[in-house]
Image: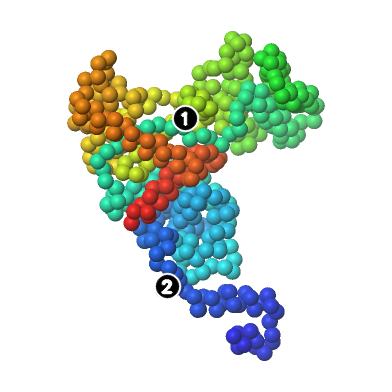
């Protein structure tokens, strides 16, 4: 120790000593090999994941030219850790730097403490770069692990549907119009700067803002007040739309990326204005393909009819529960009848496992005549109560159906667990396809945890 500290006869500062002890001595005295607990969950999980296959998929999204990207095992490992622990990008990087087990899981054989190995923003950039396509393949590879490790028994398939709430504020018509108006004001100023336009543009932004704030401060609002404020905001928005369209015509560099981005976004603004005017004139509260969020215009209200949550806002998903594992069959931002898409779930199941399930367990919404005929043709035993007034079940069959319907609670519990424990109660990714990426990663983390508990 004295030889290391002296450094050529000159004593080091305490800061230099600490850096030397951590960066030099720790690596020599405590390498990962043989020093970490082999029963740790991250070491066990590390040995089960096919990192080489994931590397091949990951490599397709990068070029051999330019600066090399981050190692795939580091990125994939951090994403699995993030969703298993349900923590932020910043927190997962922080824990990675402090925990040797997490570093081993991400492919390191020596402890990294000197400098931050990866910036949290890199995770967001990589998710945006590889996109939904990669994470679909990623989930398929993880499902193959379950089959190869023989930790999943394919006998019964439970099916159900749920809505995973998107990360938007609770939508109101006045809030949506205010977000739209603020975007228009911001881009009026931007267009003036781009085009060097000196003319004054009367936006009435302060008056409009005052109308909205006075309305928001009221604890109780009558239907008449809501209609009046909505009409006022619609008039301000309509005026601002015309001003933006006029400024775009006056800007010389209309083909620039920035101008094209404003034009594309303006289409959503015009559609929001049209829908709100139509609902206002017809005095209705619903309209086809209704936009409820300015920042995520693809989100639709999905009526579920549940106590406390009559309407939910986010993608609707059909899921299958097979031997304790929750698998995504279908995702859609438009409302659909889950009973009408059961065939897709059956086909997806056969594609995953190479055979159809012997038994299908579902609630009554899946019990249409067409579905029952399909189950009979495919030789699938369905736990559904027969149609008609009289119960035509034998005592044994009736007992079996009731038992399977009680077992159906497992898929309800698994869906709730995915939301509460694995971060799917609120989908926070803002990149294109972020909701699907969030759902797939959350389910992957959940299924890996289940596998780990069994092995």
Q: Quadrant of the C terminus?
A: bottom left
Nearer the observer, disc 1 or disc 2?
2
Which tag, 1 or 2, sits closer to the chain's start? 2
State the image quarter where residue 258 is shown.
top right
For disc 2, the neighbor class at 10 Å (few under 14, some 14 to 19, many from 20) is few
* 100 sits left or right of 47 in the view: right
Quadrant of the rendered structure where residue 16 is? Answer: bottom right
| Res 33 label | 2
Q: Residue at 69% of width from left, 78% of height from top? A: 14
* Residue in front for this viewpoint, 412 or 88: 412
Residue 232 or 172: which is nearer the viewer?
Answer: 172
In the image, farthest residue toward the top: 282
Indicate the secondary structure of the residue bearing disc 2: loop
- Left or right: where does residue 103 sit relative to residue 381? right
Task: Give the residue pinned by disc 1.
Answer: 333
Where residue 298 appears, x then y in whole percent?
A: 52, 29
Instruction: Name the disc covering residue 389, or none.
Output: none
């Amino acid at each position: 120790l004295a030889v290391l500290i002296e450094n050529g006869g000159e004593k080091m500062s305490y800061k230099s000593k600490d850096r030397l002890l951590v960066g030099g001595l720790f690596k020599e005295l405590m390498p990962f090999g043989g020093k970490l607990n082999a029963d740790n969950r991250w070491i066990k999980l590390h040995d089960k994941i096919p990192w080489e296959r994931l590397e091949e998929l990951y490599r397709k999204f990068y070029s051999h030219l330019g600066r090399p990207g981050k190692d795939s095992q580091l990125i994939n490992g951090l994403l699995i850790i993030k969703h298993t622990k349900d923590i932020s990008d910043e927190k997962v990087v922080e824990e990675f730097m402090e925990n040797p087990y997490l570093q081993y899981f991400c492919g390191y054989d020596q402890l990294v403490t000197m400098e931050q190995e990866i910036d949290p923003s890199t995770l967001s950039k990589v998710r945006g770069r590889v996109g939904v396509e990669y994470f679909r393949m990623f989930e398929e590879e993880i499902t193959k692990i379950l089959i190869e490790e023989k930790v999943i028994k394919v006998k019964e398939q439970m099916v159900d549907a749920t809505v995973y709430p998107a990360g938007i504020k609770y939508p109101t018509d006045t809030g949506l119009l205010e977000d739209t108006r603020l975007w228009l004001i911001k881009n009026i100023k931007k267009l003036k700067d781009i085009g060097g336009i000196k003319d004054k543009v009367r936006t009435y932004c302060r008056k409009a803002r005052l109308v909205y704030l006075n309305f928001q401060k009221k604890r109780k609002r009558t239907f008449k007040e809501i209609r009046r404020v909505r009409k006022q905001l619609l008039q301000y928005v309509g005026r601002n739309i015309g001003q933006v369209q006029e400024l775009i015509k006056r800007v010389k560099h209309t083909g620039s990326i920035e101008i094209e981005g404003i034009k594309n976004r303006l289409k959503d603004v015009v559609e929001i204005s049209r829908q709100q005017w139509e609902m206002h004139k017809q005095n209705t509260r619903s309209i086809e393909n209704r936009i409820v969020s300015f920042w995520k215009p693809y989100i639709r209200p999905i009526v579920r009819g549940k106590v406390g949550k009559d309407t939910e806002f986010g993608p609707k998903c059909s899921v299958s529960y097979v031997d304790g594992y929750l698998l995504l069959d279908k995702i859609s931002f438009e409302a659909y009848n889950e009973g009408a898409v059961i065939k897709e779930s059956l086909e997806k199941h056969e594609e995953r496992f190479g055979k159809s399930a012997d038994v299908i367990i579902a609630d009554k919404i899946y019990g249409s005549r067409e579905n029952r005929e399909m189950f009979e043709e495919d030789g699938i035993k369905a736990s559904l109560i027969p149609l008609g007034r009289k119960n035509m079940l034998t005592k044994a069959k009736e007992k079996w159906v009731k038992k399977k319907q009680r077992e159906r609670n497992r898929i309800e519990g698994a869906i709730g667990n995915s939301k509460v424990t694995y971060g799917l109660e609120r989908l926070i990714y803002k990149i294109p396809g972020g909701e699907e990426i969030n759902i797939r990663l959350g389910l992957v983390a959940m299924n890996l945890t289940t596998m780990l508990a069994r092995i």
